[in-house]
Amino acid sequence: MALQQSQQQKPSAAEAKTANTSIPNAARNPSNDEPNKKRNATRREVLPAGIVGTEGMNTVEREIPADEPPALKVNSSLAVIGRSTPRLDGRLKVTGKARYTADVRLPGMLFAQVVTSRYPHARIRSIDTSLAERAPGVRAVYVLDRVLGNAELRDKSKELPAKFPIVRFAGQPIAAVAATTQAEADDAARLFKVEYEPLPFVVDEDEARKKDAPLVFPGAADQGGTAGGGGGPQGVTQEGNVRGPVKSGPRGRPAGDINRGFAEAEVTVEGEFRTQVQTHSALETHGVVADWKEDGLTVYASTQGTSSVRDEFAAIFKLKKSQVRVVTEFMGGGFGAKFGAGNVGVIAAQLSKKAGAPVRLMLTRKDEHLSVGNRPSSIQKLRVGAKRDGTLTAIHLFSYGTAGTGTGAGAGGPAQNMYKCPNILTEEADVFTHAGPAAAFRAPGHPQGCFALEQTIDELAEKLGIDPVALRDRIDESPARREERRLGAERIGWSRRRRAGSDTGPVKRGLGVAQSIWYRFVNMDSACEVRVTQDGSVEILSGVQDIGGGIRTVLAQVVAEELGLKASDITVRIGDTAYPAGPASGGSVTTGSITPAARNAAFKVKQQFLEEVASALGTMPEYLKLGGGQVAVFDRNPNWSDGDRQGRSYKAAPIKSLSFRQAASRLKTEQIAARASRSDDYEKSRATYGGVQFAEVAVDTETGVIKVERVVAVHDCGRPMNPLTVESQINGGVLQGISYALYEDRILDRNTGLMVNPNLEQYKIVGSRETPRIEAILIEEYTGRSSTDAGGIGEPATIPTAAAVANAVYNATGVRVREMPMTPARVLAALQSARGKGGVRS
Amino acid sequence: MSKHDEKEKQDAGAFGHVTRRGFLKGAGLTAAGAAIMENGLLGAKDAAAAEAEPVVVGPGRVPVTLRVNGTVQKVQVEPRTTLAEALRFELGLTGTKVVCDRGSCSACTVWLDSTPVCSCMTLAVDVGARKITTIEGLAQSEELHPVQEAFIEYDAMQCGFCTPGMIMSCAALLNHKANPTLDDVKQATSGNLCRCGTYPKVFEATLAAAKATRKGGE
Ligand code: FES
Ligand code: FES
């Protein structure tokens, strides 16, 4: 019985009743074959599955926790979810009233400045703080006894003991000062006398690999990961500065035997690709306002994880987690680098503790480039073998790169996971250099991995004489990507694509394609509370933070959908660890993790709401229906469909209707509330998110300038919750990808170890004039994995862009540029060397 | 105003009497000062005045009167204090953001009279009688500026940190040009860095706002 009912997409009468009275099917229905698991009672539920608009669209039956809401219909049948909804915080943002950490001003707040090392490698003999301490306005100084972020020696006895942390990169924080004004703090920071013993250093990854290179660590070192991924595996063998290589493949281990695979190959393609170090360059630098009090620590932090910041503060300062409160109302970008307390947080909290006043520390732009994260470089040797029909037989990637004093320079993800191939081996090594540690950066390892893999697949297609889109149709098993290739090819006009280097004039145009792969991750520490008050107002509370993706608005949509209201009716309070636990926003997990908790909480509170309102009206909860801001009262269950044996839906007319607000006034108490977290995914098999991007470029072969003219980006993210903000994230991913492909480069001077462009004019980032026409297309894919079935978009959107641009450059010129950024100089050099070989028509 | 500020207070002349030469003497020629001269933000009149009556100000705090968003505000700032710092820290107008603090991102854009400038590259003592409009002063009380409306509708923001500066640039464009082209919008925002990559929606929103304004004005 339970099975039959739930196969109808709408909740049936009995099921609604079941839900309302919270009697799980497993407990009440002895005919159910499931073992009677009282604590984890479940029921069967049929959920939408497949890609809307394709033949694969269907349903799937899942065993789901009994207290979770009925299946959410596909977006076209919903009122709020899936509709483009302007951000609820838009008004605050456009009027300048949104309060970011940089804007927090507490009574008596002091301003801090950090003293950093100007040597890339040194032992510090002494630090004299006396002048700084006497400077005007100074209230506290602090000398770091530990530096966070760098990898750490596994065996500390390998290094001579040091009074102060050993400097391993230029820009490493050494000390700090807090003063009444920022100017005073800045002045005082210049008065620290630091006596250094400079040591030999190496900032170039090729130099650092050499046997006699200066060592960054005199023994094996490991770096812990963060909530956003990043960091490499622990306990890896290390020789000199080279750590690894770590051998891996699909799902964490090599597959098959690449030697056999290459022996079976009829065609082999190989190449070496180089990618540069990119800094996150979020507009708001890393920063906090720390307020140390007797009874606990309050921190306003520019972070992607209120909870992960709280956890690190609690651990470092030996406080209970309940004694640390972290608040992030608004934050100005993170892209993977902002998860922990970090040196910035520790410094501010220490200064606050010493001064007995709140302390604000926002990093300078220069320090932001130097010390708080970057995307590691990569040098990748990739070899792919295939049969004549395109079937892949072997993929072998050998890569190394530098994450500075950190780890995690691997680039193997795409090679391991994108295409079907029986024999895959990736070997990824980290090379330590005297440069700031890397941090997770929007899809760690993947944009660099795609740059190599997708160019190699492009080359393979040409060698095989198969269209690159058609080749991918053969070797990629994902139905979503297949549909994306179809839609994208149609939109960009892929059939216009000509043979590489067809244009005869100096400006050559071309089309390129590349695709991305990312994975569904879920953070189970995701909870929400939904409150309904007698005046009809509704609030949702969660610790989760909005890093610009728009989760604030999506949470309102979810609650509004469940309660039949508009998104703007809902007050969203987030970004505060005082609220129920929220996930850190990294790995594109936010929407997929927190929205089920929001829906579960809204569903719970709705049940209580309906019960109380029904009892006040003298009717049954299942005779009430929420929608359009109204509570409609029926004389029977409006969802009943068994009245009509022919299967025609029975439409009951409401006997009366009252506004949500009127109904709320009938609640027994001032406020009802429900808190819910999320269960693990209904289905735990691996799921991927990705996209296919098509780029159209014009290459001026006289100047070497590449202009990206148009990008079509077709993506999947499970159920799109708010297409408007998803599009924004796709635009952002594409633009960051173009910026990475063509402009950005952290340049370290080999002779001094200093960054030569630690600013925003010489560190070049894509701007308005380089912005091409971008067409974002979203597909709607259901997989029945949670009560919202939402996924993520942030990372997949940026993964394939650089590769798509590179393939388009090849199609335009007939010359491959295998090194990023693809600057005019590199383009000209590639053209020149091809001309030498007679490869370019001009 | 703290005690400390009082102590530092120096009477270096009433508002309007701070001259370029006086400032340069007092504070030394800074990169910011040089850039301001190059940008011609100091009017020719000021320059002429500088020849006539040198006044030394600083390095301590000096009283400055700022005309901000239709109000007159008196602040005490050091000559080296930028307009951005004065707005954010002295007046609590934190809508104006500081990102690079050296004229390369336009996050700090405000209007002096009707000209968009980088407030991180403008010294508070140099503003003179010019009217300052910040993002907080763009809306007419409850009613948003059409560019603000359009930014919300078209989602021309993600993290929102570049948004105030971006809006000030786009709204300034519409003041000068009622019927801008896409290229005009790109040009107007070419100094505005948006790391979240929101440009396509900024273009859409600004063109839509221009259209709405033209319709409204008919
Ligand atoms: S902060 Fe003024 S231009 Fe960047
Ligand atoms: S919206 Fe984040 S920098 Fe522009």
Image (tube, grey):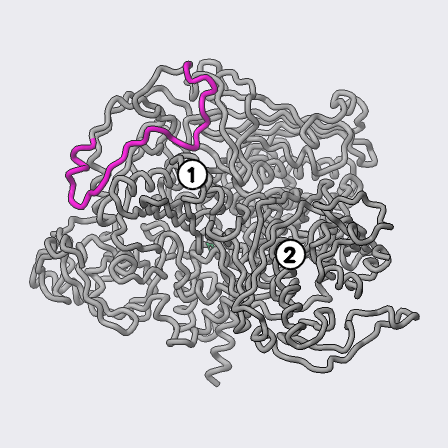
Q: Three-letter amino acid code at disc 1? A: Ala
Q: Is residue A693 magenta?
A: no
Q: Which x, y percent locates residue A652? A: 79, 77
Tell which subunit mark 2 falls on: A
Residue for badge 1: A314
Q: Depth check: give the residue in front, A587 or A104.
A: A104
Q: Which x, y percent locates residue A581? A: 53, 48
Q: Secondary structure at mark 2?
A: helix
Q: Depth check: give the residue in front, A552 or B29.
A: A552
Please indicate, yes or no, whether residue A493 appears anywhere in the rendered image. no
What span is in magenta? A129-157
Residue for badge 2: A600
Relative placement, left or right, of A771 versus A299 is right
Q: Depth check: give the residue in front, A279 or A644.
A: A644
Q: Residue at x 32, y 66 (%)?
A: B111
Tell which subunit mark 1 falls on: A
Distance of label 1 from label 2 (alpha carbons): 30 Å
Position above or below: A460 against B45: above
* Quadrant of the frame with the C terminus of chain A: top right
Q: Is residue A149 magenta?
A: yes
Q: Depth check: give the residue in front, A816 or B28.
A: B28
Label 1 crowd (10 A; few <14 / some 14-19 / many >=20): many
Q: Residue at x 78, y 45 (%)?
A: A36
Q: Secondary structure at mark 1?
A: helix
Q: Residue at x 60, y 47 (%)?
A: A589
Relative placement, left or right, of A132 versus A70 is left
Relative placement, left or right, of A820 versus B76 is right
Q: Which x, y percent locates residue B99? A: 37, 51
